[in-house]
Image (cartoon, grey):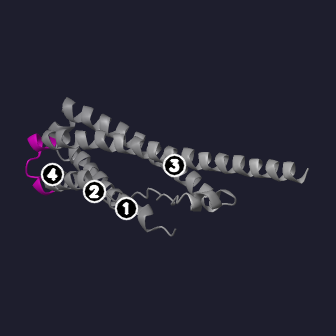
């Protein structure tokens, strides 16, 4: 009888470990999918930036420093690998793109350009999607990190060498305490 009890206990423990491991895998995959959503929106923004630069350049060619800064930041963003670097560069790029968009106030002909206005609408849409994607990603990271840091799933996480994911901190959030 004792053997049956120990067998049932071992089976229940094994089932619990499998469930916890599968929850960790699902949470990690959710983080990966959420990052992919951010990456898609960043790619959309990166694709719009050269068009915006070209549109502004036609009307405000002497705004060379801003145009060069946007182009350089786009290139850095495409090459960034580390999440902190990518977030910092993307925040700077967003700031420079906003400067480009603000040039319309000084150039009425730019403000009247259908191409510029379409690009502006598309960039606003991309920024809205990016904001949502960042929130979704950070929620997925929180969920994964909670699984990794709470009992009993922390035991399985340590055995399977799961590591906490990094939150995406954008702009002024970069310096917030952890």
Q: Are marks 1 and 3 in contact (CB under 8 Å)?
A: no
N-terminal of the pair, mark 4 or mark 1, is 4
Which residue is tagged 1? 84
Residue for point 52% across, 53% down: 141
Q: Which of these two is toward me, 13 or 115?
A: 13
In this rendering, the answer to whether 116 lies above or below 11 is: above
Q: CA distance from mark 3 to mark 2?
A: 22 Å
Which residue is tagged 2? 80
Q: Which of these two is toward me, 32 or 167?
A: 32
Q: Which of these two is toward me, 134 or 94?
A: 134
Could you classify mark 4 by the number of other residues whose Cα lies within 10 Å: few (under 14), some (14-19), or many (20 or more)? many
Which residue is tagged 3? 28
Magenta stretch, overall SS: helix
The stretch drawn in magenta includes residue 176: no
Rendering coords of residue 83 (x, y %): 37, 58
Range of residues picked out in magenta: 56-65
Left or right: 44 with respect to 132?
left
Left or right: 42 with respect to 48?
right
Number of disc labels: 4
Q: CA distance from mark 2 to mark 1?
A: 9 Å
Per the rendering, the mark at residue 67 is 4
Left or right: 167 with respect to 150?
left
Rendering coords of residue 43 (x, y %): 29, 42
């Amino acid at each position: 009888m004792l053997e049956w009890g120990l067998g049932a206990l071992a089976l229940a423990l094994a089932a619990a470990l499998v469930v916890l491991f599968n929850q960790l895998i699902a949470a990690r995959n959710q983080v990966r999918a959420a990052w992919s959503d951010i990456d898609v929106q960043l790619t959309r923004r990166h694709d719009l930036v050269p068009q915006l630069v070209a549109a502004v350049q036609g009307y405000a060619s002497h705004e060379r420093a801003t145009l060069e800064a946007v182009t350089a930041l786009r290139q850095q963003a495409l090459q960034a690998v580390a999440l902190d670097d990518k977030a910092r560069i993307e925040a700077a790029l967003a700031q420079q793109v906003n400067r480009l968009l603000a040039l319309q106030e000084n150039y009425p002909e730019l403000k009247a350009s259908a191409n510029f206005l379409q690009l502006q609408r598309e960039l606003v849409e991309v920024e809205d999607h990016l904001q949502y994607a960042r929130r979704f990603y950070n929620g997925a990271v929180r969920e994964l990190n909670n699984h990794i840091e709470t009992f009993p799933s922390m035991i399985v996480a340590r055995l399977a060498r799961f590591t906490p994911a990094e939150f995406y901190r954008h702009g002024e959030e970069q310096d917030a305490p952890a």
